[in-house]
């Protein structure tokens, strides 16, 4: 199972988030809509903990909505998830999380976590079983790292979606655990757009 | 903390602290460890510097992490050990210091903050919690001036004027011991701190990427823009090449001398 998220400001003002279905359960959505129109959370790792964690996050989002009369912002969800994960410091949730969404200014925000709650805001991040393979590719294509004399063009929505599809197709080739399907969530100020793309089924 | 029910101060923290299970479950994944951080006092305040690489058993989990976390306007803490532990405990410390400030109308001194952190970590001694922090602050009031403390989750709490923590600290110590004096100017101190982190990142596998420098004075902390050490490496290489050329042109007859010198030339 593998997922990756990219966030970027610029003309598209959007953020993208994707995941791949597990090999064992043919289609199990890992990207979880954070009960808001502007945030998606993706979990990879031990599936049991993914499910429990998403249930807990869902409940906490609802509690916040009812007591504060507003939806949680991406930054707030990130901080909350950090404390939820750390509360199980000595018997952790074996989940690698990535949160993608829009911040208060409408720019893309990506927050990546480790299983015990350490987090920070990035522009892009890959997580899951194939993350070591894909993170360098994202560093190069989105961060323009290790390239000399190239123009740092801002990423457009079409280019970003295409990049993500390519990245996941490559992952499905070389990582045994990645495959079956890819679900892409594109988050813009107009809402969340989801598409499902098939990957290698072996 | 946990057993003292009469202390109302600590009861608030009891709820969200992670519970310790009697049997520690071995983790199936590695946690982020390995760093170079340093801090020292001089006439211009306290200077703290750190690299930004967050590694996770061989993989660089994050090349641009923040290892120096501001706790309040006049206190900054460097973090080393497990990222999650350091980040969360610093947050808990910030909260407790803010509560102290609201209750007693003055900021807790760095010495007090160090004692507080040390005592909060004590119940977790023996567990796999790993926090090694230096608290760098400027105290107001009666004992005004710069202040530097080292707190570790194994129970160590030390006051000092120079500390370096992490896997890259031996390399940093050698640079710092050579150059740090009380009478340094801010520029000189910054350049020594940068140099120490730079040399440590070169030799230590678990340190690298960028260097952050924070300076704490009576007016609060200021942060220098993050610097990419890769550029520094290339600048140094260029400088050495130019120096070698200059030496060759100045003493063309002594090429033998130059080759011997070159062979003996150690990295500074």
Image (tube, grey):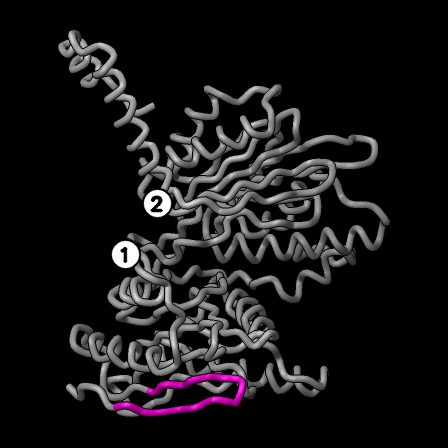
Instruction: Work out whether B137 lies above or below A156.
Output: above
Quarter-of-image position of residue A43: bottom left
Q: Is residue B144 left or right of residue B90?
A: right
- Subunit of label 2: B
Above or below: residue B112 compared with residue A146: above
Left or right, A44 with reference to A54: left
Mark 2 residue element:
loop
Can residue B154 be seen here? no
**Residue A185 lies in the magenta-colored region:** yes
A9 in magenta: no
Q: Which quadrant does the N terminus of chain A fall into?
A: bottom left
Q: Judge from the rendering whether residue B148 lies leftward or rightward of residue A131; answer left or right.
A: right
- Percent position (x, y) of residue B230? 34, 43
Same chain, marks 2 and 1?
no
Rendered location of residue B44, percent (x, y)? 66, 28
The residue that appears at 55% across and 52% down in the rendered structure is B124
Q: Which residues are magenta?
A: A183-197
Distance from Cα at disc 2 to Cα at disc 1: 24 Å
Secondary-structure class at tag 1:
loop
Residue that mark 1 sits on:
A147
Magenta portion: prevailing SS class: strand
| Circle on res. B206 | 2
Judging from the image, mark 1 belongs to the subunit labelled: A
Residue A63 higher or lower than B93, as above or below: below
Where does residue A124 sit, x and y in percent of width and height? 40, 68
Which residue is painted at 21% across and 16% down in the image? B248
User: Looking at the image, which residue is at 34% across and 55% down?
Assistant: B60
């Amino acid at each position: 199972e593998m997922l990756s998220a990219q966030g970027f400001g610029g003309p598209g003002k959007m953020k993208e988030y994707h995941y791949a279905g597990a090999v064992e359960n043919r289609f199990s959505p890992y990207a979880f809509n954070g009960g808001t129109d502007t945030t998606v959370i993706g979990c990879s790792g031990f599936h049991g903990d993914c499910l429990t964690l998403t249930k807990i996050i869902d409940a906490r989002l609802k509690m916040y909505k009812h007591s504060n009369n507003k939806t949680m912002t991406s930054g707030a969800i990130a901080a909350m998830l950090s404390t939820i994960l750390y509360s199980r410091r000595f018997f952790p949730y074996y989940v690698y999380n990535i949160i993608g969404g829009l911040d208060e200014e409408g720019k893309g925000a990506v927050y990546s976590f480790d299983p015990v709650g350490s987090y920070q805001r990035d522009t892009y991040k890959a997580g899951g079983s194939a993350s070591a393979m894909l993170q360098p590719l994202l560093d190069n294509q989105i961060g323009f790292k290790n390239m000399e004399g190239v123009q740092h063009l801002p990423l457009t929505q079409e280019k970003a979606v295409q990049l993500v599809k390519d990245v996941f197709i490559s992952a499905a080739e070389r990582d045994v655990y990645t495959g079956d399907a890819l679900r892409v969530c594109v988050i813009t100020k107009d809402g969340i757009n989801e598409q499902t793309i098939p990957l290698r089924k072996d | 903390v946990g057993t003292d029910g009469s202390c109302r101060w600590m009861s608030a923290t009891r709820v969200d602290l992670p519970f310790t299970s009697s049997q520690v479950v071995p983790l199936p994944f590695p946690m982020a460890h390995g760093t170079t951080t340093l801090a020292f006092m001089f006439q211009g305040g306290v200077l703290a510097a750190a690299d930004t690489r967050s590694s996770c058993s061989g993989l660089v989990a994050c090349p641009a992490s923040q290892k120096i976390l501001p706790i309040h306007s006049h206190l900054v803490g460097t973090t080393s050990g497990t990222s999650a532990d350091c980040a969360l405990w610093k947050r808990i410390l910030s909260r407790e210091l803010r509560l102290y400030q609201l209750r007693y109308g003055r900021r807790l001194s760095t010495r007090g903050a160090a004692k507080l952190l040390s005592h909060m970590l004590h119940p977790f001694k023996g567990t796999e919690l790993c926090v090694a922090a230096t608290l760098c602050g400027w105290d107001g009031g009666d004992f005004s001036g710069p202040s530097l403390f080292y707190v570790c989750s194994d129970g160590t709490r030390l006051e000092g004027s120079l500390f370096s923590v992490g896997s890259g600290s031996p390399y940093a110590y050698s640079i710092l011991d050579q150059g740090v004096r009380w009478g340094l100017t801010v520029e000189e101190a910054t350049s020594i701190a940068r140099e120490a982190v730079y040399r440590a990142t070169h030799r230590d596998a678990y340190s690298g990427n960028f260097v952050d420098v924070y300076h704490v004075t009576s007016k609060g902390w200021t942060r220098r823009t993050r610097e990419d050490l890769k550029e520094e490496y290339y600048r140094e290489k260029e400088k050495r090449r130019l120096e070698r050329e200059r030496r060759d042109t100045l003493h063309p007859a002594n090429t033998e001398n130059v080759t011997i010198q070159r062979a003996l030339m150690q990295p500074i």
